[in-house]
């Protein structure tokens, strides 16, 4: 149950080696197939968008990546370590923002972060420095001693992102992190996170159904009915589909599954 | 050997539970008022109706108020265990449990940390209750306050583990009312918390048998004996065994291979 220095984890990644590798992953809810033979990689320094409608299997996939579910078939490797074998060690490399808010409303911003730091095994002194840094990076320093209950939706989401980055993960999983936010706040978060991936060599897997969050240079995986309908750079996928924009290309690739 | 990470996480979980407990003042108040109502209101009425003869661990005739204090201590821990369970179901519906269960530590350890934090909170409640009983004029042996501590930890673990198990079974907060009707009330009333077994036998031998099998009866008896510096081996074995069974079952229920479904909506 020991741990590596969290600050070094992002530095340890190699840009050529996937931060996340999923091979032939399938999952059923009783008789209903939720994911079927899914394979893809997520690389450091790159934002990989997972685009799909509600019910396409995005949240199920995230539950498998975070060990909330165990896959029946297939293999998940995080930083080269197989999740099923390495378990907790592999989880250390991940930062997660769930679709549903997972903050404690009765605690303050810093108490929430300290709780998470403790779960990650970060010592008190190191945690204070990291909390300060992440709050500053997400413009939350002035709200440090406020109860989460008093924060608006945008600030709560920023706090969840700060928390997910606190232990210096090499892979950041974002499950529809901008749902419920206004247009300006969404745009700001999209910018901040894309910059973070580029500057820190962070690998991001971002589940969304909002096409305007995707940039041409992003890696894109289109998930539909538990199948991968297409994957490649977003701009290339639009060009390959022969459609005018990503919205039309998204509909086109979905139709190939139906 | 437990690593630095494990200890840090353990204290982090404990600190969060204590912070939450003090933030929720109503919870603390409710935890104290419930047994005090029994002590002040019901015990006054029952004292006249129930004559208690000398039986171990008491060495002389004892008043009904003195008799029910260990039962009410158990009641505090029983309700605390169920409150923890309720908050876990709530956390599960609200998503907070995901954060705990995706921490890079073995799941059994995370659940043990959560359970231990709940026990610590229950100790605060029980000792606050005991101080009030003393102020009310019920004089239990002072050294008993110390003797019951290890027993309170064990009984708190058993009732907290039962809460964990229930939280793993109940998937929706609306179903929690059933727990009150089918777990808490039968456990409390069909035990030795309010009346000794021989008194129960006078009215119904079947109910007496049920009370004798009820693990909560053994938790109460263990507390009662400990208060007088005595040890009930039979009760200890039952409570320890139930703690192990409840905890192992809860860990098994929370095993990721069985899936973790916070709510029906989210599994889509």
Image (cartoon, rainbow, N blue to C red):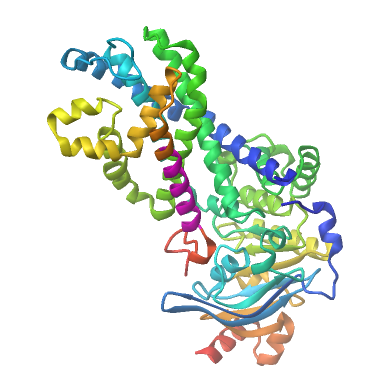
In the image, residue B126 above or below residue B253: above
Q: Which residue is painted at 43% across and 34% down in the image?
A: B236
Whether residue A147 is visible, yes or no, is: no
Q: Which residue is painted at 71% across and 44% down in the image?
A: A140
* B232 lies left or right of B206: right
* B96 lies left or right of A108: left
In the image, residue A131 above or below residue A52: above
* Magenta residue span: B239-254
Q: Which residue is painted at 56% across and 69% down in the image?
A: A70
Q: Taken as a whole, is the magenta stretch helix, strand or loop?
A: helix
Residue A60 lies in quadrant: bottom right
Residue A61: give x, y in percent of width and height: 58, 71
Residue B244: give x, y in percent of width and height: 47, 46
Q: How many marks?
A: 0
Residue B17: give x, y in percent of width and height: 55, 36
Residue A53: give x, y in percent of width and height: 53, 75
Q: Which residue is painted at 43% across and 26% down in the image?
A: B231
């Amino acid at each position: 149950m020991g741990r590596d220095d969290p600050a070094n984890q992002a530095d340890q990644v190699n840009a050529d080696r996937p931060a996340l590798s999923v091979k032939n992953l399938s999952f059923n809810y009783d008789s209903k197939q939720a994911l079927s033979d899914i394979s893809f990689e997520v690389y450091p320094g790159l934002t990989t968008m997972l685009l799909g409608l509600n019910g396409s299997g995005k949240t199920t996939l995230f539950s498998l990546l975070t060990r909330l579910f165990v896959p029946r078939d297939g293999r998940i490797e995080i930083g080269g370590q197989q999740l099923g074998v390495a378990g907790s060690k592999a989880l250390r490399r991940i930062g997660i923002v769930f679709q549903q808010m997972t903050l404690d409303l009765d605690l303050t911003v810093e108490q929430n972060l300290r709780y998470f730091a403790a779960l990650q095994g970060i010592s008190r002194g190191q945690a204070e420095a990291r909390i300060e840094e992440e709050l500053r990076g997400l413009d939350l320093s002035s709200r440090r001693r406020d109860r989460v209950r008093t924060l608006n939706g945008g600030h709560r989401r920023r706090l969840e992102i700060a928390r997910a980055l606190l232990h210096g993960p090499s892979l950041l999983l974002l499950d529809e992190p901008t749902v419920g936010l206004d247009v300006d706040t969404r745009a700001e978060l999209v910018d901040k996170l894309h910059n973070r991936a580029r500057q820190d060599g962070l690998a991001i897997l971002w589940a969304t159904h909002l096409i305007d969050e995707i940039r041409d240079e992003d890696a894109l995986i289109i998930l539909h009915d538990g199948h991968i309908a297409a994957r490649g750079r977003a701009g290339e996928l639009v060009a390959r589909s022969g459609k005018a924009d990503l919205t039309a290309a998204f509909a086109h690739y979905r139709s190939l599954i139906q | 050997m437990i690593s630095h990470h494990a200890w840090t996480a353990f204290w982090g979980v404990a600190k969060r539970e204590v912070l939450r407990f003090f933030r929720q003042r109503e919870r603390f108040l409710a935890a104290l008022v419930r047994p005090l109502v029994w002590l002040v209101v019901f015990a006054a009425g029952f004292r006249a109706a129930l004559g208690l003869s000398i039986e171990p661990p008491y060495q002389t005739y004892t008043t009904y108020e003195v008799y029910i204090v260990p039962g009410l201590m158990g009641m505090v821990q029983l309700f605390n265990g169920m409150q923890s369970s309720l908050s876990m179901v709530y956390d599960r519906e609200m998503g907070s449990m995901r954060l705990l269960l995706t921490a890079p530590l073995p799941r059994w350890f995370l659940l043990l940390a959560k359970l231990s934090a709940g026990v610590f909170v229950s100790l605060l409640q029980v000792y606050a209750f005991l101080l009030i009983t003393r102020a009310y004029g019920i004089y239990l042996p002072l050294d008993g306050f110390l003797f019951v501590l290890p027993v309170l930890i064990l009984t708190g673990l058993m009732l907290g583990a039962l809460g964990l198990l229930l939280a793993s079974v109940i998937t929706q907060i609306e179903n929690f009312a059933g727990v009150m009707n089918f777990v808490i009330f039968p456990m409390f009333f069909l035990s030795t918390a309010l009346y000794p077994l021989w008194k129960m036998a006078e009215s119904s031998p079947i109910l007496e048998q049920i009370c004798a099998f009820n693990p909560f009866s053994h938790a109460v008896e263990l507390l009662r004996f400990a208060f007088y510096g005595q040890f009930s081996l039979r009760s200890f074995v039952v409570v320890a065994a139930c703690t192990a069974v409840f905890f192992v079952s809860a860990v098994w229920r929370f095993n990721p291979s069985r899936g973790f479904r916070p709510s029906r909506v989210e599994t889509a």
